[in-house]
Image (tube, rainbow, N blue to C red):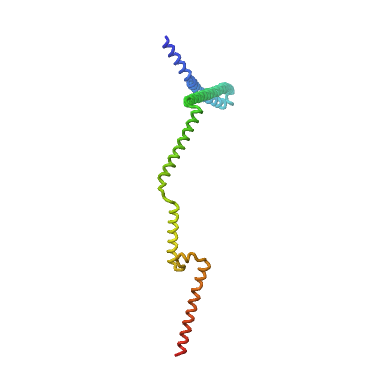
Amino acid sequence: MSGWGLGWLGGGTAKQKDAPKKAILQLRGQLEMLSKREKHLQNQMAEQQAIAAKNVTSNKNLAKAALRRKKQFEHSHEQTQSQIMSLEREIYSIEASNINKETLDAMRNAGKAMQQIHAGLTIDKVDQTMEDLREQHAISEEISEAITQSVGNTGIDEDELDEELAELQQEELDTKMLDTGNVPVGDQVHRLPAAAQGELKGKAPAQAEEEDEEEELRKLQAEMAM
């Protein structure tokens, strides 16, 4: 007896769940029948209209009877159209209600799922987790910095490297100056003021010109002696 009762309860739940679908199917079946009736009545109205038009002059009684039947078909047609509209409205209402119910059930299930997810979570636990993460990141940065310093620090004197670099630069500069032949190379020359170096460069062309004049003068004296 108890087993039958449980089965009956389960069957009732299933029936409640399928009730909207069954109602919609039934309404659609009735709507299809009414649509066929509507088409049939339209054909009947057209047929009676043709009979009335054909006998309007030759047989007025027959034409009048045809028009009377047409009026009856029109009345049935109007009722059928009203029934069709009512069925369509009911189908729409059931579908909308069923969608609302399914949407609400889905949202309710989503809420339960979120409750299960958040069951073991609290603000304090989240804050503690974030604090632990920050602490571990800080430790990782310290370890990376320590490793980098231990690898890079080989006991080399940076001042000594700078002096050696300056010497290499000076040697390269002296080499370029020797290749051009314009400026003498040496510590004394480098220590001369810029103006003094300019004076040395300025004397060289004047001395050469004076020697050329003396050479021409000697040649002229030799020719006069001959």
Asked if residue 36 shows in the view, the reply is: no
Q: Nearer the viewer, residue 175 or 120?
A: 175
- Quarter location, residue 162: bottom left
Residue reaching furthest to the bottom: 226
Q: Position of residue 209 (x, y in %)?
A: 49, 78
Residue 214 visible from this viewpoint: yes
Q: Position of residue 46 (x, y in %)?
A: 54, 26
Judge by depth and name the residue closer to the eye, 94 or 73: 94
Residue 78 falls left or right of residue 170: right
Image quadrant holding the N terminus, namely top left
Q: Foreground residue, 203 or 219?
A: 203
Q: Please name whichever residue, 71 or 168, is drawn nearer the observer in this view of the structure.
A: 168
Tell me residue 43's x, y (percent): 52, 25
Tell how many labels: 0
Q: Which residue of the protein is positioned furthest toward the top in this rendering?
A: 1
Position of residue 178 measured from the top left corner of the image (x, y, whole percent):
43, 66
Query: Is 73 rendered above or below residue 209?
Result: above
Q: Quadrant of the C terminus?
A: bottom left
